[in-house]
Amino acid sequence: MSQSSVPLTRPPAPAKVKILATADRLFYDEGVHAVGVDRIIAQSHVTKATFYKHYRSKDLLVAAFVAGRAERAKDALAADRGRLNDPAAVLRATVDGFAAESRRAGYHGCPFINAATSQLDSAGPVAPAVTQWRAWLRAALVELFAAAGSPTPEDAADDLLLARDGAFGGGPVADADAATAALHRTLDRLLP
């Protein structure tokens, strides 16, 4: 294929980026239900027409928020894979990342679970975006556990996901140190 026939991808419009960045901050800090479109428009300093040009509904914006968070998670895992050669070390780094996230200042729970439980339209785009991210994370964990020599990598991935969900949900309302320690113990039990 010649270089002239390769389609060029344009970066997203600055207003679209600004809207999503504002929504990301507000949705995570205050919750999807607590933040209305008018507030996002005002804090993004865009017009209503600009908002609706880029996001036809709040659910589409929430789905974009989920997709953006998923890309960050994928980038973090790719970075761990790039710097670590051992799949068990990558799993440990992943759990360390989960633990660090659940203990950081301003932590308000898992953004994916929060978005899934806050969707406005059960048949809308939010649930598929969360499901897609979750399937990707599970597949990545299955692959890592298999490479680490787990005899049951799918079960190990499911167990670690459940422990992650517990740490992310329990950390803010219980002892974050205990939740983090339990998450690390779970991984230790799952690794061969």
Image: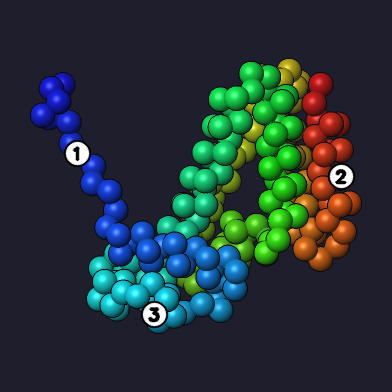
Between the C-alphas of marks 1 and 2, the distance is 47 Å
Label of residue 42 in the image: 3
Residue at (51, 77) in percent of width and height: 35
Count numbered badges in the picture.
3
Q: Which amino acid does label 2 sit on?
A: Ala
User: Where does the image place residue 37, in percent across and percent down from the top left?
Assistant: 41, 77
Q: Callout 3, which amino acid?
A: Ala
Q: Earlier in the sequence, mark 1 or mark 3?
A: 1
Is residue 175 positioned above or below 160 on the image? below
Mark 2 Cα within 10 Å, few/some/many (few <14, many 20+)?
A: few
Residue at mark 2: 181
Give the number of the disc on residue 8: 1
Q: Residue 22 carries which label?
A: none
Asked which secondary structure carries label 1, the reply is loop
| The C terminus, quarter of image | top right
Find the distance from the CA under tag 3 to the CA under tag 2.
42 Å
Instruction: Locate residue 140: give its quadrant.
Output: top right
